[in-house]
Image (tube, helix red, strand yellow):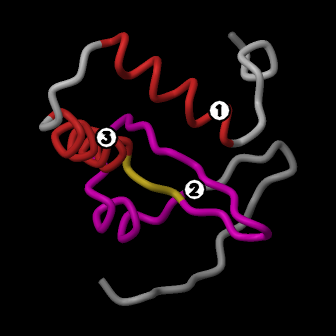
Amino acid sequence: MATQSMDIKVASNGRMILPSSVRKAMGLHGDAKVILTIENDQVRLSPIGHGVSRAKALYREHAKHARTTDQFLSDRADEAAQDGVTPQEDGK
């Protein structure tokens, strides 16, 4: 899809309306949820289904490797140790 820019008014209460052409391009119909990502001074809206699709693809990629929970936790502890993070600092 080509990059497209447009001006959209943001009301004083923070609400804005996505034009129908934008909703159609994003595959949004009726009530819908989107993921809002802020990077530096840029805002990106993504249909929530795209995030789910990406998560499923990542799962399929990593699920190919048969690992037990203990192996996963051990690998995570090794990664944290390499980063110099103790389990307490890592929220565990």
Q: Tag 2: Cα neighbours inside 10 Å, few (<14), some, or many (≥20)?
A: few
| Of marks 2 and 3, the one in the foreground | 3
Q: Secondary structure at mark 3?
A: helix
Nearer to me, 72 or 37: 72
Q: Answer left or right for 64 relative to 55.
A: left
Q: Which residues are magenta?
A: 18-44
Q: Amino acid under label 1?
A: Ala
Residue 29 painted magenta:
yes
The N terminus - image quarter = bottom left
The answer to whether 3 is drawn above or below residue 16 in the figure is below
The answer to whether 75 is drawn above or below residue 53 in the figure is above
Q: Secondary structure at mark 1?
A: helix
Residue position for label 3? 55
Q: Position of residue 75 (x, y in %)?
A: 45, 28
Residue position for label 2? 17
The answer to whether 74 is drawn above or below residue 45 in the figure is above
Nearer to me, 12 or 89: 89
Is the residue under label 3 in contact with that under label 2 (CB below 8 Å)?
no
- Tell which circle, 2 or 3, labels the residue nearer the N-terminal end: 2
Residue position for label 1? 80
Using the rendered view, name the quadrant where residue 71 is placed. Answer: top left
Q: Amino acid under label 3?
A: Ala
- Tell which circle, 3 or 1, labels the residue nearer the N-terminal end: 3
